[in-house]
Image (cartoon, helix red, strand yellow):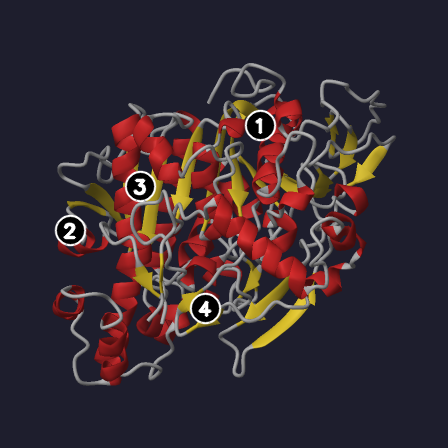
Amino acid sequence: MTKRTVDGEVGFGGWRVAALAAAGLGMWGCGDDSTSGPDGGDADVADGGDGEAADAACPVDVPGGHGIAVTEFGAVQGADSEGGGLEFLGVPYARPPVGELRWRAPQDPDCWEGARPAIEWGEACLQRSYDITASPPTMEDLGSEDCLSLNVWTPDIDDAARPVLVFIHGGGNQQGSARDEAMGALMYEGRFLSQTEDVVVVSIQYRLGLFGFLADPSLEDADGHAGNYGLLDQTHALRWVRRNIEAFGGDPERVLVFGQSAGGLDVCMLVASPLAAGLFDAALIQSGGCIVLTEAEAQARSEEWATAVGCADAAGRATCLRALDGAALLGPIESPELDGITNLKFIPYVDGWVLPSAPVESFRAGTHNHVPVIIGTNSDEVSLMVPEGSVTPAEVTAFFERFADPLPARLAELYPPGTTPESARAAYIQALGDGQFTCQARMISRALVEGQTEPVRRYYFTHRVPGDLGASLGAFHGIENFYLFRTAESTLLAVLLTDDDRLVEDALGGWWTRFAATGDPNGTGGPSWPVYETATDPYLEIAPEAVTGAGLHTEACDLWEPISEIPTE
């Protein structure tokens, strides 16, 4: 039996559950000074120390014409969205992180002349993509290192100052993109949400896997920083939004950053990071935790990787790594998923700069970015990773027995595996879902309210898609995105959608939009979404008829929360 602990994080620190990466594992085809960092200095300098500050504005030639927005780096030509509004795709927010800029903090893009076409999606960031639900599972290398772009959907480029919703995609920080496709639809396409709710929607790309989170000391910059490049990308994109979104009809002082799965985890990191201070006004975490590595863990994984690709010599390692092409760097990657549990090798770590301490510690101490926060999970998070008939009662019991006494008996009481594959699967899904998602959300909520006065709220999404898929998978990991972005209407399930599905679409869009606009999701009609407090653990259950509740899986979470060592075999 192997056990591991992630120092500095309370509970579930070592458990890498496949659902954390599920939405992107290929299975589906506030501050008032936006230019200042946490110490009042220039935020772009804080972004890497060697980057050119965006204050050196480009001389912009302003061409006339329909669908042209002017950014500080040049004008961009968008296109009419089907159904109304405008879309700007593949807008660069940083220079390509290639050559000597590989494993460096993002730098502002070069200026351009004329109106740059923004009518095609940018490349996904380089990755090895796995479809672990295919039979047999498949993998492919895709994307490019030249990938730091974002997309904007807006009803109009006027002075309406609309709320801005900035989305960070999931994929375990290893894979995925803003253009992820599932069930025949572009899952995160923002045009429907923008048109329906009269908001500006932004989605971003950021470096993934070893390109985004390699933390080898040989890569340190002049200030001694290495790793967490994906988080620096996200921070840079948020700074671009603060400085440029007004040109797209958005309000730079009403920015919601939200993400799902690993995107939600990254939102947690941004709430904790002093480098993101003043770049957003509210944060929303969908099915994401706050898992981080220690510096020692991150560096050990990076050294192991460097050795595997032939760059074992520490003295020349940085030069060796930068000389390799992307395919060679991806070479050693193996499937990250086994039996519903995933080991995500390259993720954020506590580096003392981007993350001065583990996020939950920062929250409790009140040293994070104080903004209104919503955090929530789905009722059947890991069902996608546990196919019907894939687990037996004996296997579930064996999984429980990996834990030290008296936990096996308590887990069996809370999640009885029964006598059939059906009952065993249900128990396994619930146990994994509670341990990694539901109870993690409770812990994060408690930590936040301990360290801030801005309101925190929880939700629990229980709505199932129609038909056999919903019957088999329940409210699975990532399903809420189809309702939030209103892309369910474009999926293969469109013919099965009912009035209940449309009620959920309307409710999610309204809550998320009001939260972006005011910091409070409540509106007229429906239940009042309560502010979180530790004593009662209140939450909103999201379903066609939303209801409030208190004490979500209390007995289970009381068991899970103190666990800091999770057996992996």
Determine crowd level at label 3: few under 14, some 14-19, many 20+ residues with C-alpha closer than 10 A: many
| Residue in the image at 46% along x and 23% along y | 30
Q: Please state, as top left, top right, bottom left or bottom right, where the N terminus lies in the image.
A: bottom left
312 on left or right of 35: right
- Name the spot of residue 102 as percent of width and height, x first: 73, 46
Distance (Cα) linking label 3 and label 2: 15 Å
- Name the spot of residue 118 as percent of width and height, x first: 75, 42
Distance (Cα) linking label 1 and label 2: 41 Å
Distance (Cα) linking label 1 and label 3: 30 Å
The type of residue carrying mark 3 is Ile
Dot 4 or dot 3, earlier in sequence: 3
Q: Name the residue under label 2.
A: 554
Determine crowd level at label 1: few under 14, some 14-19, many 20+ residues with C-alpha closer than 10 A: many
Dot 1 or dot 2, earlier in sequence: 1
The type of residue carrying mark 4 is Val
Q: Nearer the viewer, mark 1 or mark 2?
A: 2
Q: Name the residue under label 1.
A: 250
The type of residue carrying mark 1 is Gly
Q: In which quarter of the image is residue 70?
A: top right
The answer to whether residue 88 shows anywhere in this view is: no
Is 253 situated above or below 258?
above
291 on left or right of 163: left
| Residue in the image at 51% along x and 53% along y | 170
The answer to whether residue 64 shows anywhere in this view is: yes
| Residue 495 image label | 4
Is 148 situated above or below 500?
above
Dot 1 or dot 3, earlier in sequence: 1
The type of residue carrying mark 2 is Thr
Q: Mark 3 points at which residue?
A: 444
Is 242 situated above or below 313?
above
